[in-house]
Image (tube, rainbow, N blue to C red):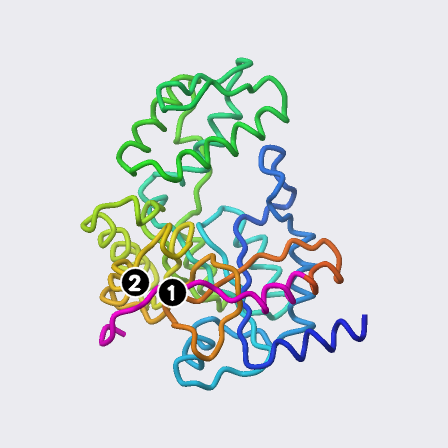
Amino acid sequence: MFLLDKGLHWIAKGKLSIFLFHKVPALADALQPGDMDQQTFRRTVAFIRKHFHVYPLAEAARLLTEGRLPDRCAAITFDDGYQDWRQGAASILQELNVPATFFITTGQFDGRPMWHERLAHVVNECGEGELDTRFCRLPPLPTATLADKVKAVKALEFHFKYIPPVLRDIYLAQLEDSVGASAADVTRMPVDDVVRIAQMGFEIGAHTHDHPILSMCDAQRAAREIGEAKERLECILGSNVIGFAYPNGRPSVDFTTCHIDMVKSAGYRYAVTTQWGAVRQDTSPFQMPRFTPWGPSHQHMALQVFRNIFKEADSLPEARGLT
């Protein structure tokens, strides 16, 4: 263990490891067993705090831009926006005195739950042994058992990711109608929680308005998604929002160089991807990679961090003069 810890300290010199989390429920949802529960999250944060100097991401991004990135630097981030964040993950982080950034999808404040949450609700509400998905270009999905439903949620999420947003919304409404589900019954992050989390000392960043994959949007829709989320959050918080997270976040696949330009033009100062790898001194502040450690043990997490730091993250060329 001592040699593992020493090795981790050595290879993390001059690099920034950005950790990514999503929903952190008290207990993992049976339909989404991959969610990290609060007990596991607490253990993971304790590991990060032991091995890294955890910085607010905005500060780490500034130090990167200035060429002054410290050794063994880390940041903690969250994507999407969930009802259990304030009393769960944010409270745990506050208790442990660890900073973090929460990237939030703002469409839910207009009564539109996130599309992947609506899909899980449809599957949960399906009382038949099969969900008819032929109209959205999928074969019917078995839903008779819990294992069937878990597979159905994964299949639907994978399929819906790369459907154009307008068509995605139509298919979602049809799915809900087919099982008698209502989007109004899907939990959303309250606007007050955004304010409370910011008041707890955490940074708030933007994650688009309706969480589309930017590469599936036309230029006008993509620019609106990027800019509207920033404007909405700044109106809620009364302060500047400078960080952005690309939905799904893979360079070339989920966003392109033109989307990086849109992020810069909207006034953001940094952006994060979901590409594995550590941030190095020559990494663009608009393409900072992130990864999620899944544990479960100290040794496993150390090995995962080792692998991530050695991973060379893919990136896209950027136009000069837009930063």
Mark on residue 260? 2
For the point 45% across and 77% down, which residue is it?
59
Q: Is residue 306 magenta?
A: yes
Locate residue 286, reporting x and y percent. Answer: 36, 68
Above or below residue 61? Residue 302 is above
Q: Nearer the viewer, mark 2 or mark 1?
A: 2
Q: Which residue is mark 1?
A: 271
Q: Which quarter shows the N terminus?
A: bottom right
Locate residue 306, reporting x and y percent. Answer: 65, 67
Span colored in magenta = 304-323
> As drawn, is 181 to the left or to the right of 228?
right
Q: Are marks 2 and 1 in contact (CB under 8 Å)?
A: yes
Locate residue 193, reporting x and y percent. Answer: 45, 53
Locate residue 291, reporting x and y percent. Answer: 54, 59
Q: Residues within 10 Å of mark 1 (few under 14, many from 20)?
A: many
What is the quadrant of residue 32 in the picture? Answer: top right
Q: For the residue labelled by badge 1, is the local secondary structure a helix, a strand or a loop?
A: strand
For the point 43% across and 73% down, which residue is it?
283
Above or below residue 136? Residue 84 is below
Amino acid identity at mark 2: Ile
Mark 2–mark 1 Cα distance, whole angstroms, equals: 8 Å
For the point 59% across and 53% down, which residue is it?
88
Q: Residues within 10 Å of mark 2 (few under 14, many from 20)?
A: many
For the point 59% across and 24% down, which residue is it?
148
> As drawn, is 218 to the left or to the right of 120?
left
Amino acid identity at mark 1: Ala
Above or below residue 155? Residue 319 is below
Which of disc 1 and disc 2 is earlier in sequence?
2
Mark on residue 187? none
